[in-house]
Amino acid sequence: MMNALERRSTFALSSIFALRMLGLFMIIPVFSVAGQAYQYATPALIGLAVGVYGLTQALLQIPFSLIADRYSRKPLVVLGLLLFALGGAIAAMSDTIYGVIIGRAIAGGGAVSAVVMALLADVTREENRMKAMAIMGMSIGLSFVVAFSLGPWLTGLVGISGLFWVTTVMGLAAIAMLLMVPKVTRHHQNFQQGYLAQLKQVLKIGDLNRLHVSVFTLHLLLTAMFIYVPSQLIEFADLPLASHGWVYLPLLVLSLFFAFPSIILAEKYHKMRAIFLVAITGIILGLMVMAFGFESKYVLLTGLGLFFIAFNVMEALLPSWLSKAAPIQSKATAMGVNASSQFLGAFFGGMIGGQLLLLNNTSMGWSILTGIAIIWLLMSFGLAQPRYLSSLVLRLPESRQTDEWTSQLLAIRGIEEVVVMSEQQVAYVKVDKQQIDDASRQQLTHLLGKEVAI
C-alpha cells in the first residue's frame, strides 16, 4: 500500500505530466486546419509547427537529465514548466506561422519528462514504484483522449490563439502542483565522473538500450496507429471524427482492469520480464486482428482494445523497469535517453503513418506495423529479469547530523541509496536484499538502535 506521502506525490507529478501532455495534444487535431489562417502558412510549415515541439523535446531531454543527476530536480522541473508556459504565450501572441514555430520550439525546450519521472522514483518506495508509474502512464493516456475531444471544442470557443493561452495556464497550474511534492535530498555511493562519461556509462548497458528501443517502438506504433486508424473508424465503423474520443475513452478504461492486475503480478511475484513479453505479444495480436478484420466494425474495435490493453501495461512497465536497471547515480540520465527515444519514436511514427496512408492498402499497412512489433518482440528476448530492491522507511535521527547518518548507512553493504525528506523527517532507504549479510544486519541494528527485519 502507498503511504499518504506517496499518494500525494504520485497525484501531483502525474497531474504535471498530464497537464503538459494535454497542452501538447489539444493542438494536434485542430492545427492542420486552423493553422492555415496564419500569415506565411504552408502545409510544410504547419507540419513543422506541430512537430518542432517533439524535436526540441528529444534534443534536450538528455541535457536536462544529466543536470538532474547532479543537482536538485524540483528547480529543473519549474524551469521546464516556465519554458512550456512561455512558449505557449509566444505562440498565442503570434500572427505568423513563424512565431508559432518559435513558440512551440521554446515550449518543447522545457524537456523535463525524465526529470519528473526520476523525481517520482525518488519519492516512492521500490515496491510501490510500478503502481506510481502506472498511474502516471494512465494519466498520459487519459490526457490524450481528453485532448482529442477538448481541442476542437475549445478552438470553437476561444480560437487557436486562445488554445495556446490555455496551454500557458496549464503550464503555470503544473508549477502549483509541484508544491505538493516533498523536497528531497539524495545520498548514494559517490561516483564522480564527467557528464560525457556518465552518458557513456548509461549507453553501454545492454538492457537499458533494449528498453530505449522498446519505448521508441511502442510510441512509433502508437503514433502511426492514431494517424492510420481514424479514417478506418469513419469508413468501416461509421463513426464521425468528432465521436472518436468516445471510442478511445471506454477502451482506455477497459484496459485499466487488465493493466493493474498485470502490474501487481509483475512486481509482487517478480514476473516483470514475462509480463513484458506477453504485453508485446498482445500488441502484435491487436495489430494482426486489425490487419485481417479491419472491414468489420467489431473486429476493428476488438483489435484496438487489445492494442490499448497491451499498450497501457507497457506504459507502466517500462519506466519502472528502467528505474530498476539504471545505475543509482545516473537514474535521470537513463530516463532522459529513454524520453528522447520516446519522442523520436513518435516523430518516426508520424512519418510512417503518413506513408501508410499513401499505400491505399489497409491490410498491407497493418501488416507492416505488425512486422515492426514482431522484430521488437524478438529483440526483447535478450532482456534479463531486473534487480529487485526493497525500501525501508526510517525516521531521521534527532541526535545526529543527517549527512553523517546517511554516510554511515551507505557504508553498510547492501544499502544502495538514501533519499531524505527533511520537512517530513523521514528517509527512504533502498536495500539490495541479495547483498545484505549478518554483518550488515548487525551494523544496521547498531546504527538505528533497534533490529530491522530485512
Image: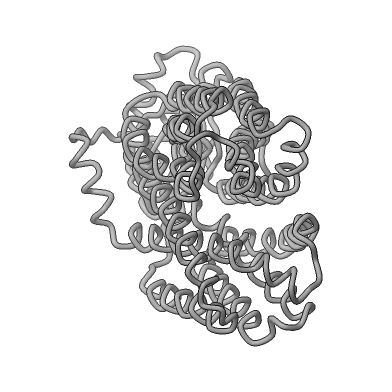
Where residue 95 sits, quadrant-wise, is: top right
Residue extending furthest bottom? 292
Work out whether residue 121 or residue 166 is closer to the camera in this orientation and state it.
166
Horizontal side, residue 388 vs residue 395: left or right? left
Which residue is found at the position 60% from the left and 50% from the top? 137
Where residue 249 sits, quadrant-wise, is: bottom right
Q: From the viewer's perspective, is residue 368 above or below residue 332?
A: below
Q: From the viewer's perspective, is residue 238 above or below residue 17?
A: below
Work out whether residue 444 or residue 161 is closer to the camera in this orientation and state it.
161
Residue extending furthest front? 40
Which residue is found at the position 58% from the left and 23% from the top? 175
Horizontal side, residue 285 vs residue 64: left or right? right
Work out whether residue 177 or residue 24 is closer to the camera in this orientation and state it.
24
| Quadrant, the N terminus | top right
Which residue is found at the position 56% from the left and 22% from the top? 93
Residue 307 in picture, x, y percent from top left: 63, 69
Q: Is residue 201 visible?
A: yes
Residue 400 in picture, x, y percent from top left: 42, 14
Which residue is found at the position 72% from the left and 83% from the top? 295
Horizontal side, residue 412 vs residue 145: left or right? left
